Amino acid sequence: MAGARGEFSSRLGFILAASGSAVGLGNIWGFPTQTANNGGAAFLLVYLVLAFALAYPALMAELVIGRYAKANIVSALQQVSNSKASRFIGTLTGFAGIITASLILAFYGIVAGWMIAFALAPAASLFAAESTTDWLTGFSTERNMIFMLMTTLIISGGVRNGIEKWSSRLMPMLIILLLGLIAYVMSQPGAIEGLKVYLLPDFSRSIDLQLIVAALGQAFFSLSLGVGTMLIYGSYISKQENIASLGRTITLIDIGIAMLAGLLIIPAMYVAQYNGVEIFDAAGNLIAEDTLIFTVLPALFDTMGGAGMVISFAFFVLMIIAALTSSISMLEAPVSYVSEVHGLSRRVSAFLVGAAIVLMSTLIVINFTELFGFVIAVTTRYAQPLLGLMLCLFAGWIWHRNQVLTEIKAGFEQAEHSLFWKIWPLYIRYVCPLAIAAVFAQKVLG
Ligand code: PHE
């Protein structure tokens, strides 16, 4: 089986795939509004510290375990275990990761389906295809299936011909679209006001625990941690690559694109305000979440006349691309398990798991009020940080330290004398588990 295993063709191939996983709706949608509502640059500062001090070490834990084991999260955690008990816990953690990845994909697919609708609806209405427009904006489940089908088809293509090929096509498009949209929005009246809110720190907002909790959750979600996606992508990295530097690059790209997205979303909201659109909620916060994407921004595009239609299309295509390169990594986590452990072909595994996730999405859509927010909260607020904590414990305490070092030294000979090796093991053993546990305790108790 080892010989038949996929591998990224190059360093760049991995970087595009892994940053495709990291850069998603969390960057373009979540990060900018969290920043604006949590004191602008003050939040940014906390976020940067947490991303480098906690999320980067946790990302490294996943990448190193993955490349060592060359396997899905369940088999990988079994391999680094050193006793019956840790093997059992590893198996449980692995399964929890796969289930969490599937549940995240179930809600992510719904949101991405809305993006498809909002990208296509203006064009449909232009051609007066009223029934099509109604279908597109009617929040039905079919578009979710279109998105899931795209995700499944890419994953059934394999590591090089699916994940790497599509990430390499889509990520450059994402960057071009993002930069183009920023340039346009910045030229509009009102944009500078938004830029100030985004970038100038609001010192009246103290850095409280709540802000730290929000920033940590955002960092873990954004780097796709805890659910085995980075672990499985790590398992496709060649032994010749310097894994510490790859992890750093992914972290930098993820943060960089989140910050860039802030330069688009926040100024766009103030342009909308300038054009007469309400951008604050009753509590005086900037409107966030679904109302921002599906009400405020479309209202803004409406005020822009003919250009608005192009901008709207470009914006929702940007969101679809960001979602797709992330969703394929989510699907790869369970698919790699099913194909490696149960011996099914990649194609069959992809379609089986894809169908199961469509079913989950449909259940969520049918019980939308009860399930949608609930699934998001359970997976991203609780499961992801907790699983991240478990992976740190595996890399820091259970797996033999010499084996960890040997794995990092492959492709990074001087690792033993590097700053990375002086700091990272301490982080993974003490700092990350304690910090995540503290944040988690605060969430549960407070
Ligand atoms: N990182 C993705 C985003 O920011 C979300 C994600 C979470 C992807 C978990 C994979 C696994 O949108």
Image (cartoon, rainbow, N blue to C red):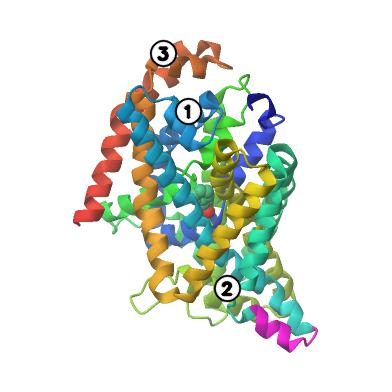
Magenta extent: 127-136
Indicate which label's residue lies in the foreground, 2 or 3: 3
257 w.r.t. 420: above or below: below
Q: Position of residue 45 (x, y in %)?
A: 39, 46
| Residue 222 percent coordinates (x, y) | 48, 49
Residue lying at 71% horizontally and 80% vertically, measured from the top left: 305
Instruction: Choose the circle earlier in sequence order: 2 or 3.
Output: 2
**Residue 82 seen from this side:** yes
Residue named by callout 3 = 402
Which residue in the protein does label 2 denote? 297
Position of the N terminus by quadrant: top right
Whether the magenta-drawn stretch holds residue 131 is answered as yes
Which mark's residue is nearer the viewer, 1 or 2? 1
Disc 1/disc 2 C-alpha distance (Å) = 42 Å
Query: What secondary structure is found at the residue carrying circle 3?
Result: helix
Q: CA distance from mark 1 to mark 3?
A: 13 Å
- Amino acid type of the residue that numbered disc 2 sits on in the rendered structure: Leu
Kind of residue at badge 1: Ile
| Image quarter of residue 95 | top left
Secondary structure beneath dot 1 equals helix
